Amino acid sequence: MIGKSYFFLSLLQVGLSQEWKDNTPREVPAQEGSCVQIPCHYTYPSHLANHSRVGIWYNNEIRNVSSIAFHSKDHNRELSQFRHRTRLSGDLRDGDCSLIINNVTRGDAGPYYFRIEFENRNNYSFHPVTQLQVSAEPSQEWKGDTPQKVTAQEGSCVQIPCQYSYPSCLRHRPRDGVWYNGKGQSSSSVAFYSKDHNSISSRFRNRTRLSGDLKDGNCSLIINNVRRGDAGPYFFRIEFDGKNRCNYYPVTQLHVSDFTDKPTIFPAEIIAGKRVNISCTFNTTCNGTAPVVTWDTPTDVPGSVSNTVTQHGVTLTYTSVLTLIPSLKHHGHNLTCRVRYPSVSSERILVLTVQYAPQNLSITLFDMFDASWINITEGNSTVIICSVESFPASNLTWRHLNVTMNRTRSNNELWLVIRHVTSWDTGDYQCVAENEHGAVEGSITITVELHVKPVVQKENLPPLSQVSVVHNTCGIDCTCTSSTMDHVLMNSCTLEVSQHAWNESCCSCSHAHIHGHTNRPDNLLYANINFLVLPSGDGTVHRSEVTEYAQLRFQRN
């Protein structure tokens, strides 16, 4: 019976012993002056879950009181060389036994193992050991990312981007950040100190801050109201518990120039009588003192303004939207968008180009007087000008009898030139102006005054009734032109008349006054001739329009 009990007890111990396990690396590297973490996780029998426990790290391969690097219950039992430099990174109750060693020294190198002790003497040492190797080279975990050069504009704000890394064992440790304006560490060159603002140099005080959180690895520096004297080298320093610390190099050179940045206006289509939104934006990569974006408008241009700030990456965009309803009288007025910092400002000007339908169409003659009717002497020339006010420029078209004569889209003006006016040019002329916003039309009426064209008189002749002709006859070539609404009719006839009688069945001479002659054998003389259409079937005679041109030929004795 005793043998069986011993056998079952042995099996129970074997089963329980399988629950004592740990997970630690065989080797961990560290850099002198940095911190290091030896990862460790352990398991234990479940019946001990609610029991208190003590964790001990030994800097040795065997358990020895003189080699305790960390003791969770009594720190006084730790070796003096480890005291105040070691701690656990987690909670023993969660199975986390990872060891942190701060400010690593060359003497910390060697084997390490972990031991757990429960209050009921259930204790266990976890092997194999972890070998810690310490290098004299600077830790690669201390890294900084800052630009070599940053340019700022006087009066604005500037951000010096900065990201830093550090040993993971310091993740939960408090820290302080310092920015120096110089290549060395002196109290007069402190541009920012997160722990004590009174330690900041007076020329930077109340003008500098960090843009992010040091716990997130963000060490970016903001300088507001930049001055010329702010130019120079800058570098960042991090301090953990006053022990683990690092200066991040190389330095960043800050250059300061004049303030030249201007806002940008995004013009919109501006139509008279229609509401429009006009946007003005200003971009900056500095989230320090915010610029103020405002509008300057004429007093008779009422409107409302809304302001927003958006961020895309590191760029901040300040936007001001002006809402107004423009009218024609605002065409050519200035809208000014201005951006202001405490000591500097800049502006951008937009000249309002208000679009509107054609209006105020006028028709004038070349000598610049308005007219709706003109009388032109036959054979003369004339210039008629159609002008209009519109934006954009209108398409201008001259029409006569529904036929387009000419057109243009230039300077809102179109000339109509009529050379050597004839009776065919009589009638109404329309000028039409149109753009995408509307149309307008005007007209002018032209009448033609017939003109008798005399020739140079060589000598006076007797009245036609007294002209002597060969064979007592006179040959009259009569060419007449008559017009109807839809066609032009050319008529000609030759009239032979006696010396004492005129046959008016074809042509008749009115104003039978000879005005002159040429010295050619066949003299060509001019007279006004009325053309009578031959009698119709009912015997009536119909008179046409006044003849425009006629020839009278005769042979003198």
Image: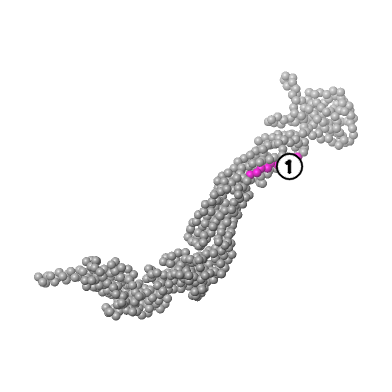
Q: Where residue 474 appears, x then y in whole percent? A: 85, 27
User: Relative to 468, is 208 on the left or the right?
Assistant: left
Q: Where residue 437 appears, x then y in whole percent? A: 59, 42
Q: Is residue 35 above or below residue 533?
A: below
- Residue reaching furthest left? 1
Please tell me whether the stretch drawn in magenta is mainly helix, strand or loop.
strand
The answer to whether residue 332 of the structure is visible from this angle is yes
Which image quarter: residue 167?
A: bottom left
10 Å neighbourhood of mark 1: few (<14), some, or many (≥20)? few
Which image quarter: residue 381?
A: top right
On the image, numbered disc 1 is attached to which residue? 368
The answer to whether residue 59 of the structure is visible from this angle is no
User: Residue at the spot x=22%, y=73% of the render?
Assistant: 121
Quarter of the image with the C terminus in it? top right
User: Relative to 191, is 468 on the left or the right?
Assistant: right
User: Residue at the spot x=89%, y=36% of the render?
Assistant: 458
User: Residue at the spot x=55%, y=61% of the render?
Assistant: 342
Quarter of the image with the N terminus in it? bottom left
Residue 289 on the magenta segment: no
Q: Is residue 303 above or below residue 522?
A: below
Q: Which residues are magenta?
A: 381-391
Q: Where residue 372 appears, x then y in whole percent? A: 71, 36
